[in-house]
């Protein structure tokens, strides 16, 4: 019995050490945003002082959402944070799988740009199979193990060719041209955080759609392929950015 307990403790310690090895350098992803509501907690990316990009799963209709910018440890106030209510959420329509999973989130007031809070530009090209990228978010990086989100995690993952990714899909999930996959056998694809941010060569390329790598470490996770949505994202920002900094009540729209 004692040996069993010792092995359990060592196993948990090993998992903890593994998680610590995947911590981001503090504030090395100044575009990363934590989104919280009564129903969910997930990630997004700041792309403009007014706007965030996230997955549709991070934008529950009828729920007040708050955005925290300049975060590293979400359990502590570090003096770099900006906590801003969300004023407007615009989901790409139709938003249910297998079609699209993308939402634009407008802040109630513009972010104050600092060293710890900076936007990342929309993609200038699409990601390439085999390309090395970074994915960041809050949550467990160990498959099939839950961890309360604390400090920001970073993984290095490779973009996976479409057909190789399709071959890992369960029967109830269908492929969409708005998907890109990363992670898998050569590097773990598990980061359990809806809306986790995929960056390749300094460009925003995805927000997490399905965390397949957290069910099977051999499988890549699926991200919204943001290069396919540049025109839509720019159109939303051009037509919905306010001319004043007056906060508005939260609204939800589908263009």
Image (spheres, grey):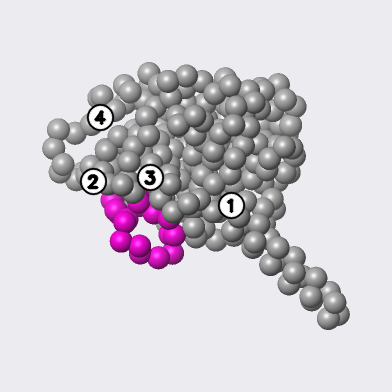
The reply to whether residue 173 is in sight is yes
SS type, badge 4 = helix
Do callouts 4 and 3 mark residues in contact (Cβ within 8 Å)? no
Label 2 CA crowd tier, 10 Å (few <14, some 14–19, many 20+): few
State the residue position of label 3: 30
- Does the magenta segment cover residue 154? no
State the residue position of label 4: 240
The reply to whether residue 105 is in sight is no
Q: Is residue 12 above or below residue 183?
A: below
Foreground: 2 or 17?
A: 17
Q: Which residues are magenta?
A: 67-85
Q: Is residue 98 above or below residue 27?
A: above
Q: Residue at x 23, y 42 (%)?
A: 110
Measured Cα–Cα span from mark 3 to mark 2: 12 Å
Do callouts 2 and 4 mark residues in contact (Cβ within 8 Å)? no
Q: Earlier in the sequence, mark 4 or mark 3?
A: 3
Closer to the eye: label 4 or 1? 1
Measured Cα–Cα span from mark 2 to mark 4: 19 Å
- Picture coordinates of residue 90, whole percent (x, y): 36, 33
- Does the magenta segment cover residue 76? yes
SS type, badge 2 = loop
State the residue position of label 1: 22
Q: Earlier in the sequence, mark 2 or mark 4?
A: 2
Judged left or right of residue 74, residue 176 is: right
Judged left or right of residue 182, residue 81 is: left
Q: Earlier in the sequence, mark 1 or mark 3?
A: 1
Q: Residue at x 60, y 27 (%)?
A: 131
């Amino acid at each position: 019995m004692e040996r069993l307990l010792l092995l359990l403790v060592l196993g948990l310690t090993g998992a903890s050490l593994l998680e610590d090895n995947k911590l981001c350098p503090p504030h090395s992803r100044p575009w990363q945003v934590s989104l919280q509501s009564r129903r969910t907690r997930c990630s997004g990316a700041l792309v403009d002082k007014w706007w965030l990009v996230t997955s549709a799963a991070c934008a529950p209709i009828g729920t007040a959402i708050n955005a925290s910018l300049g975060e590293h440890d979400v359990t502590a106030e570090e003096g770099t944070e900006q906590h801003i209510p969300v004023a407007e959420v615009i989901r790409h329509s139709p938003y249910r799988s297998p079609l699209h999973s993308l939402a634009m989130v407008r802040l109630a007031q513009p972010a104050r740009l600092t060293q710890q809070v900076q936007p990342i530009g929309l993609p200038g090209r699409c990601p390439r199979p085999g390309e090395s990228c970074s994915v960041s978010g809050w949550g467990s990086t160990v498959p099939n193990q839950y961890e309360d989100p604390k400090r920001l995690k970073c993984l290095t993952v490779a973009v996976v060719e479409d057909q190789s990714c399709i071959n890992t899909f369960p029967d109830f999930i269908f492929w969409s041209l708005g998907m890109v996959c990363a992670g898998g056998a050569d590097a773990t694809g598990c980061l359990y955080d809806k809306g986790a941010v995929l960056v390749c060569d300094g460009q925003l390329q995805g927000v997490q759609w399905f965390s397949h790598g957290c069910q099977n470490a051999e499988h890549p996770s699926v991200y919204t392929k943001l290069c396919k949505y540049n025109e839509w994202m720019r159109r939303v920002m051009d037509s919905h950015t306010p001319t004043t900094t007056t906060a508005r009540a939260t609204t939800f729209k589908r263009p």
